[in-house]
Amino acid sequence: MTRIKEKFTELDAKKEKALIAYIMVGYPNENVTLAAVKGLIKGGADIIELGFPFSDPLADGPMIQNASTISLEAGTKINKFFNIVKKIRKETDIPLVLMTYTNILYHMGYPKFIAKSKKAGIDGIILPDMSVEESKEYIASAKNKIDTIFLISPNTTKSRIEKISKSSSGFLYLVAVYGTTGVKTGIQSYTLKAIKDVKKITKGKIPIGVGFGVSTPDDVRKYIKVGADAVIVGSAFLKIIKNTTQSKIESRIESFTKSLKSQTKLR
Amino acid sequence: MKYPKDGRFGEFGGKYIPETLVPAIEELEENYLKFKDNKEFKKELDYYLKQYAGRPTPLYYAKNLSEKCGGAKIYLKREDLLHGGAHKINNTLGQALLAKKMHKKRIIAETGAGQHGVATAMACAVLGMKSEVYMGYKDTIRQKLNVSRMNMLGSKVHPVMSGSKTLKDAINEAIRDWITNVETTYYLLGSAVGPHPYPVMVRDFQSVIGNEIKVQMKKISNKTPDIIIACVGGGSNAIGTFYPLMDTNAEIIGVEAAGKGLKSKFHSATLSSGSKGVLHGMMTYLLQDKEGQISETHSISAGLDYPGVGPEHAYLKDTKRVKYHSATDAEVIDAFLTLTRTEGIIPALESAHAIAEAIKVAKISKKSESIVVTLSGRGDKDVEEVQNYLNTHDKN
Ligand SMILES: Cc1ncc(COP(=O)(O)O)c(C=O)c1O
């Protein structure tokens, strides 16, 4: 069983849902990344998504775009990223998911990139610009090594959801809103409907994680109430990192994580 | 390749897109296939191309330029005479009409030199639709005449402050808008790039250039051209010129922007020195670093200042059917002035890349040969930029 699958099984037994937290590695530097990860773990995050910056993040809003630019300017390179992952992996067994764009993997070659990720301790990969139609080599390279987490959207048809969930492992990432990351906030009724519809189609075969614009404990509670198996919070963490002095980042992240996590426990 | 059903030209192309855009791309392809051979649609487009945009454009024998070079006869395909001043209107009329058939009310576009933005604004004005255009901040400065034109035409221009603030970033921002407003918005892409079906659709709308050349050349010389030259940014004027003439014996040459030289980092010659990768929904050649981060590019012409290229060109390079050369900023300025002063035609800086290559080729060609160069646009937008270049480089 993969770490991600184990985590969902473990949470199921406790009648809890998963809090997935995203941060951009190297934003604004390695030390802050390590401090933020500590805060996330102490606060009770269940899975951590680590962003690797790409020059042209076309699915991302201003917050993550800006974090990508700063991380790249600070010299985040692939090997450095994997070294940071290894450091994190030494300290914790929490599932780690890598989020970046297709070209980063394509350029190195899918098999090589995936082998390196696996070796560093990455459990799954998310590529927002990878569509299932183009994913043959990617999936073949990842099979039995790393979870391939695909995205679906509120406008994805039933037959596509079926097709995409067959190509996905770990969890299925439901994009909550029409938009880029971290821009639209507040709960849309079409999102709640999408969660219910997707659950019906996937019949519990794969967990559903809801992300994009999820930023408050209230959001978390509402999405979980209608059936999300996980919520993904990203830009809200980057905002804390942006607005907090370095020495306080770990504790701020810890307390915010706690406030989100408390809403994932079913009563 | 007629219509690549799987969206691939050889290994290039495809659709690497966020899932939110999949229904929109499917709807687009479905409608494009439905209307592309539809009689009514073709008749309507033909009407606008002739009566509104000014087609067919002349194939002008540039006698003075030919004699100056001392070799082949140089013919200019005068896309610069089209309404709006560039070939871009061929594509925007086609896509805007299609968008209208699809009942889309809001149109978005990206633009580099501003010519595609202007052509979008015009097509939308005449067809009664609203348009918004994303343009890199750097380009809004160096092509400010076109920003004013778009404003006058009722289009909203969004300056893009991210990344290199040029065409690549304008495309990123347009895609982000499309993801956000996918239910109401039509993305009118301006070159033969992006996810399938854009590259093939834009090629088809621009093929009117090559189709006319074929007929006109036959009338003039009862032959097809010996050499065909066009500039390549994303590659729309080039593929529209080349595609209908692909099965002739012509030597075909695409010209990229060599900026300050291919050995410098300051160029946009994607096919000449790029490597394979995935950007803006397509697998193609890209200018990128060792880790797959996209490079910042440079060209004196905003319309060629792009680190990618249409996937069909990538395929034509690998199959060697088309040769891809490049021209430096300095060569382009020379060609710009040469054409201006020998023929009284002020070319767009983009098109001046093709002229620069034509001059090189003509000098070593036979008098009995013919060269057709697509003059993709006129240079009014560039005169200030050229004047600045001349002032700082002490030329005149
Ligand atoms: C006059 C002119 N020629 C050429 C281009 C380059 O585009 P493409 O390679 O798609 O023809 C542009 C783009 O802005 C242009 O304005």
Image (cartoon, rainbow, N blue to C red):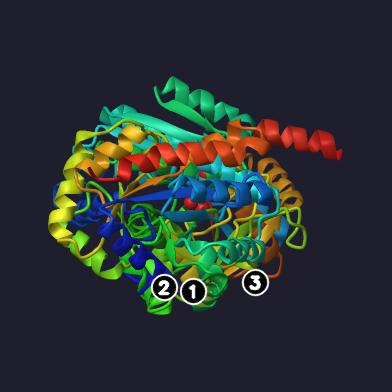
Name the kind of residue labelled 1 in the image. Answer: Tyr
According to the picture, the residue beneath numbered tag 2 turns out to be: A138
Instruction: Please report the residue visible at 59 percent of the width from the left and 42 percent of the height from the top.
Output: A250
Q: Is residue A104 above or below residue B380?
A: below
Which of the two residues, B307 or B18, is positioned nearer the viewer here?
B18
The furthest residue to the left:
A200
Which residue: 64% across, 46% down? A32
Residue A68 in picture, x, y percent from top left: 58, 47
- Determine crowd level at label 3: few under 14, some 14-19, many 20+ residues with C-alpha closer than 10 A: few
Disc 1 to disc 2, C-alpha distance: 6 Å
State left or right for residue B259 relative to residue A164.
right
Q: Amino acid at mark 2?
A: Tyr
> Which type of secondary structure does the marked residue at label 2 adopt?
helix
For the point 16% across and 47% down, which residue is it? Answer: A196
Q: Nearer the viewer, residue B230 or B31?
A: B31
Q: Are marks 1 and 2 on the same chain?
A: yes
Q: Is residue B247 left or right of residue A104?
A: left
Indicate the position of residue A185 as horizontal and vertical percent values.
36, 32
Subunit under mark 2: A
Q: Which residue is mark 3?
A: B366
Mark 3 chain:
B
Above or below residue A157? Residue B174 is: above
